[in-house]
Image (tube, rainbow, N blue to C red):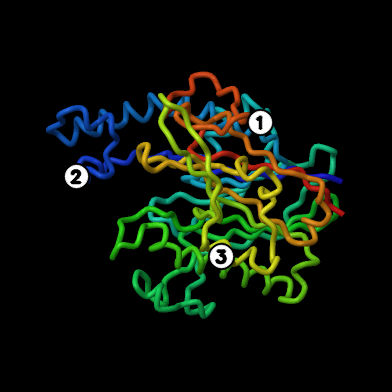
Amino acid sequence: MSLRIATFNVENLMTRFDFTGFRNQLRQDRVIKLFEIQSEGVYQQLEQARVVASTDDTRQMTALAIADADADILCLQEIDSMGALQAFEYGYLFRMVGTGYRQKYLVKGNDSRGIDVAVLVREETHDGQKIELKEIKSHAMLTYRELDLFNDQLALTNRIDDKIFKRDCLELDLSIGGVPLTLYVVHFKSMDGPRTNGVNSRQATMPVRRAEALAVRRIVESRFGAGHTARKNFVICGDMNDYQERVNVIGVRRSGYRFEHTDETESALDVFSHDGFAENVARRRDPLDRWTLYHARGPEEQWLCQLDYLWLSPALAKANTGRVPEIIRNGQPFRTIFPPGQGVERYPRTGWDRPKASDHCPVVMTLDLT
């Protein structure tokens, strides 16, 4: 019996307009900066027109990427609300996959922008096995104090009674044709932020992500027992906003590029991997072919890295030793630099930088369940 599971950060599936850019230049879209706008009312009209004009192409590509993943269970990040999810499914996804995902789950989390994790589930797998939800649980209210995770590094930017998860860890107990499977869907703290005392934003925010990873591990161990997790069927999936390796892209368009793989000395995700607690199955792919996001701040700082993960329990990893995850990159903009041999056909109307399906790529894997 098999099951296809995917994770995808769809990048701001929103039903609201953000007008804060009129007063905060850092929140203002680059195209708006080209125009001199004196009135907040005019700014709001232009911002609405900009968003509406670009969203249709974007969401068609998002739906195409989801259709290409063709998952039985789809774990999503950056969803504004259940209303946004339903409107997207009815107006876009239905045109690609039909009435595929009748079960939808979203619980409001802690994100300051109101973006949440969500899960779409088919009623049956591709081979006809029933998918049933037995229980769903949000862990958004957990604090550092409750799990005894507070430390001096966290104290620089957090308080002991702050919530651990910057969005949520959504736990779903499922039955797939009678076989139990538990999902933990997350979206960890972003790497954005200013440099502080010479420390880059990734390092400055890593204590928060490490605490989130430790909290997920504690939740799993509490659920199954610390000595029994290796024998259970669980998957930790989502956008974890950290990487253990990256591919440096060196060069410029005119003269060409070379690609240099490098391992990071430290990552929040070491919490999962250092003792075999779970396996990042994307590492079964070639080192230059594991990336799910292209990062660039000009030719001096550009790399490919994995931010989107399916971490399998040891039992699931062992039962699927011959399986390799797929990474759907057809929705990437043309500015994304692909290593040799990885080029794909982009979706219609894809732009140099936008529109695009998302800044992230879906990761999908077929799992054998026993």
Amino acid under disc 1: Asp
* Residue 93 visible at all: no
Provide residue 74's location: percent of width, then percent of height. 65, 44
Q: From the viewer's perspective, is the residue at label 1 or at label 2 nearer? A: 1
Q: Which mark is residue 213?
A: 3
Provide residue 222's location: percent of width, then percent of height. 67, 74
Mark toward the start of the polypeptide (1 vs 3): 1
* Residue 228 visible at all: yes
- How far apart are labels 1 and 3 at the CA level? 29 Å
User: What residue is pinned by disc 2?
Assistant: 23
User: What residue is pinned by disc 1?
Assistant: 68
Q: Is residue 27 above or below residue 90?
A: below
Query: Residue visible at 60% across and 55% down?
Result: 185
Secondary structure state at the residue bearing disc 1: helix
Query: Residue visible at 25% across and 34% down?
Result: 44
Query: Residue visible at 49% across and 63% down?
Result: 209
- Front residue of 322/303: it is 303
Question: Badge 3: few (under 14), some or many (20 or more) residues near its Cα, within 10 Å?
Answer: many
Quarter of the image with the C terminus in it: bottom right
